[in-house]
Image: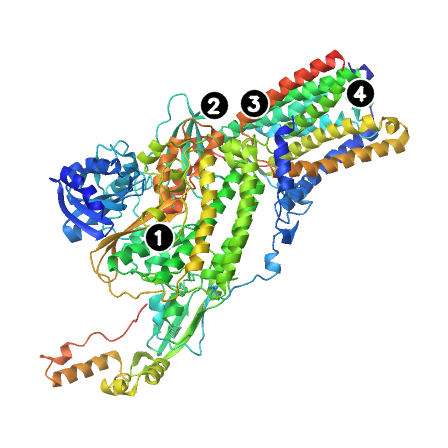
Amino acid sequence: MMKTMSISVLGIIVGVVLVAILPPFLDGIARKVKARIQYRVGPPILQTYYDLQKLFGLPSLRPTENKWFRVAPYLALASAFSAAFLLPYGKWVPVKFSGDIVVFFYVLAMVSVAIIIGAFSTQNAHSNIGGHREMMMVLSVEPILGVALGIFAFKAGTLSLSAIPLKVPASFSTVLAYLLLIYAAYAESGFVPFDIAEAETEIAGGVLVEYSGRLLGVLEYAILAKRLVLLWLLSTFLTIPILRGIALTGVVGGIVVLAVQLILVLVAYPLIAALEATNARYRIDQAVALNTRIFLLSLVVLAVAAVGW
Amino acid sequence: MVTKECLAEFEDKFKGEIREKKFLTPTQILYLVDKKDLPDMAYYLQYHPEFDESYYVMGIGSDERQLAGKFAYAPVINMLDGSGKRENFYVILKARLDKDNPEFPSVAQKLPAALWAEREVRDLLGFKPLDHPDLRRLITPEDWPEGVYPLRKDHAYNASPAGELQDGYKKAPEDTSTVPIGPYHMALDEPAHFRLFVKGEEIVDVDYRGFYSHRGIEKIGEGRLTYNQIFYIAERICGICGFQHSSAYAMAVENIAGVEIPARAQYIRTILLEIERIHSHLLWAGVACHLVGFDTGFMYAWRIREEPVMWLAERLTGNRKTYGMNIVGGVRRDFLDYRKTEILDKMKQLKKDVEKLYNIAVSSDILIKRAKDVGVLPYKVAKDYGVVGPTARASGRNIDVRRDHKVFAYKDVDFDVPVYKDGDVLARLLVRLDEVLQSISIIEQAVDQMPEGDIFTPIGKLPPYQEALGYTEAHRGEVIHYVLTGTNNKVYRWKVRAPTYNNLAAVPEMLKGYRVADAPLIIASIDPCYACTERVQIVDVKTGKVKALNEAEFNDLSIKASEEL
Amino acid sequence: MEDVKISYTESLISWKRPDLRVGVPVTVKYPLVPTEKPPEYRGKPHIDPNVCIGCGACVRACPADALTAEWDLENGLKSIVSNPARCIRCGRCEEACPTGAMKLTLEFELATPNKEDLVEVVEHHLTKCKKCGDYTEFTERQVEKAFQILPKEIVDANALGEKMQLCRECRMEESVKILAAQGRIIGDPLLLPPQHAKGGEK
Ligand code: SF4
Ligand code: SF4
């Protein structure tokens, strides 16, 4: 599987820089947009950086001897970064090999798994309920994401994540797969109405409740990074098929594609914020019911794709 | 008066037990009765076939050893005719209890509404309700010594003895795990402790432990203040319905003094009561939105609460929240003339804003999904527990003190009392939003019709050892104050019953069978006000807190000191 | 699939904001910009030391013990002490004050590291007893004011002109003497007078 592995140093640099810098900035934009919808001035755009900076400077309380409690946030962050390395940035793909789509799928799930491990490593009832909810969410959303990616891979005839957008044909089933992907990315990111695992007003932060200081900072950072990865995946899948012609033509083309990807992300985030601001939170059973319905729908789409539409 | 013939049957049935009958006011009847048949009498009145909306209001315990050589326990029943044909009235069944052995047959064995009241008199006065189903501590903290009864007259108002720590929690049912909500929790604005016994996410049983923030207000009122100074502490019983409390107290004292307050004062009180209601309902709507993660609704509700409502309150009374307007005999300040048009303008603006809020809230499918068929409180349970206010009206109870007892200027204005049958959280939301629109209309009418004239009838010395009730319909339900005057312009016994006292007791019933995720919303749906409920006794708040944290569960966790990673 | 959300997006679009401030946030940069204070506002109480006569009516009315009277009978001083940190802004003192010296101001920004900074003290000199030379419980201004406002007939009828110059003990003695002279008290007048006004209210 690894025999065709290729590594782009430039891609790694771009990826690291983006994933390291962008998530708190995007969160800042979202906070500002939400504030404006609610007639507030809102915090400065850079507020999330300040928050994280503060958290990183604070020691963490340890509610348990369980070492997984300390490992989990770093595991989550590492997983989010690993997933980011499999995505194309303009022309450059940090790490690419045939079958990396499977790895992408797993490392993305690993973020949630790490959060769940952290949540269950303490005896706090709120934390456990949060972990339980996160698990239900992962189990019901990941299949949708899997099917959507599967359809793309099937249509494009490749198992390399970065190669799919270059090859995927326009067809009825791919259009539906896009919709599935949008839904799955949104739900998986835990935006309202899917912020069920944290649900501050119900279970006091759920999976996050026992975390504090630096560990909390790392965990929040991992969650933000995961959101960026999902959004970047989406923007890649939208941008590259359209700009396929110039995507591989030299440095300039690569930069143009990168810029378009970035702009798409910057545009999508405020829209998501607006959606968040105008929604209430689902109860876990309602969310799971909705996810199940959409999963069944996705199977239909898969069948459509298999038929060749 | 229709009341006579309706009561004839009652008086006939219990003729052997009734010692004396007294009209405190034309609509407040006090029976001095033998304690033996207290449960039957209360049951008979609550389930009176003609007064079908009647309910058990409160149980007053008082130490009248200095007056009559005995203790007194007095359940109060609000006699309401749902059809509106008969005049409604209050019945107080006062039973004297032996000074050395204050036993009485528990009313709670027949009426769940009396469960808390009788635990309260046990805690505070040392009464012994016989055959009470659940006599755990309610009010005194876990380390309060046995045999010390703070509301007895021989207990100093500032004495706070220490005792042994006891465990007062319900045992968790088999195969359940415990999810604590509180004593501190985002969804609770004040300390309170719900222990949810859950299987998975489903709530099987609930234990409530509260009264962490008692301030001993009744005792202070009885011991230290004069009747005109009590207003300022009555107003501070609650940060939301302060004016309701001060008006109810004023009404009780005015009933004793036998004065009719000037019409203009009645109108001013009415307007302010309604402004307070609007502010409270908007605040609540915001919190409800916040609890389901719908923050835009939250911000919107609070914004319109701030701009026209609190803004207006500040201009009419001199403060956003503690109005300080009441005095026995009327109100202390008049509105400035030019404020009249301002009120009307702001009400117009508010009406638009509230309709918008209504649209936002109702058009949010998820909000509706989260609130519908959740936390259902059936009519029968609502009646059994004597639930009041919007919580009761959302369960089909057609009760509203403003209309039923014609307090203040409400008799002169037209308004509807919204009643919903469903009994779920959504119904409670809708009742409140409807009420806001009704309140706006009440204010508009009152401002239009407001008569000129005095705002205050002076009264001199209060007659000693007279008693009466005062009541208003607060945002959460009936607020009722009982006052027994003492000598020297002091109050001998002042009993306050806030609406949450009745509503909270029914919350465990609403929670059973629903999910943990619903719990904060259900608890919040009665708009609980712990400060109101917990006014009764002096408690060392510090020990209360420490005990709460000392629970075995938190012990196990024993949070270790921070450690660099 | 996104159909669930359409209704919110729609409601967001159809949701008309108040015309005056489309998109303008309502957040006020409060400490940086002043807020409007209505004339009715009840803020920190303030005693005008030039008008106050030290009668203590406000002290008796205050339900929160924010106002106290302090006596220094050695040096003939009575101070009215107002502690706004205890004050609940009820306005009873303003109603009780006979001279209008006590007013609730519009001031409400009272944050301070030291609550003592807020305390206001108005010092009054007590008059001296014409007879024994001790200080009486009346302030100089109180006596002055009493003569100003009381009609002359009442002053004369009750011999207040005399009485107000005496301390409580001497006044009692005087009254007892007068009453005894009129035959309304039987027994030794000197056994009856109460305590001298040492200590005072608080
Ligand atoms: S406003 Fe009220 S509390 Fe404050 S000083 Fe005056 S009387 Fe006392
Ligand atoms: S009531 Fe007025 S005059 Fe008398 S002491 Fe108080 S402030 Fe001074």
Q: State how far apart marks 2 and 3 are (Cα).
A: 17 Å
Q: CA distance from mark 1 to mark 4?
A: 75 Å
> What residue is at 80 percent from the left and 20 percent from the top?
A168
- Structural crowding at the residue carrying mark 1, measured as other residues with C-alpha within 10 Å and reported as few (<14), some (14–19) or many (≥20): few
Q: Which residue is mark 2?
A: B200
Task: Please name the amino acid that badge 1 sits on.
Answer: Lys
Q: Quadrant of residue A221?
A: top right
**In the rendered image of this protein, does residue A15 appear above or below residue B303?**
above
Ligand 1 has an atom within 8 Å of the beta carbon of the residue at disc 2: no
Question: Cβ(mark 4) to ligand 1 < 8 Å?
Answer: no
Q: Amino acid at mark 3?
A: Ala
From the image, tell me which residue sits under label 1. Answer: B411
Q: Dividing the picture into quarters, in which one does residue B265 lie? A: bottom left
- Do pointers 2 and 4 mark residues of a single chain? no
Q: Is residue A28 left or right of residue A155?
A: left
Task: Tally the marks.
Answer: 4
Q: Earlier in the sequence, mark 2 or mark 1?
A: 2
Please tell me if label 4 and label 3 are on a single chain.
yes
Dot in front, 2 or 1: 1
- What residue sits right under mark 4 in the picture? A168
Amino acid under label 2? Gly
Viewer-nearest of labels 1 and 3?
1
Name the residue carrying label 3: A289
Same chain for the residues at labels 1 and 3, yes or no? Answer: no
Q: Are marks 2 and 4 in contact (CB under 8 Å)?
A: no
How many angstroms separate mark 2 from mark 4 (CA)? 44 Å
Mark 4 or mark 3, earlier in chain: 4
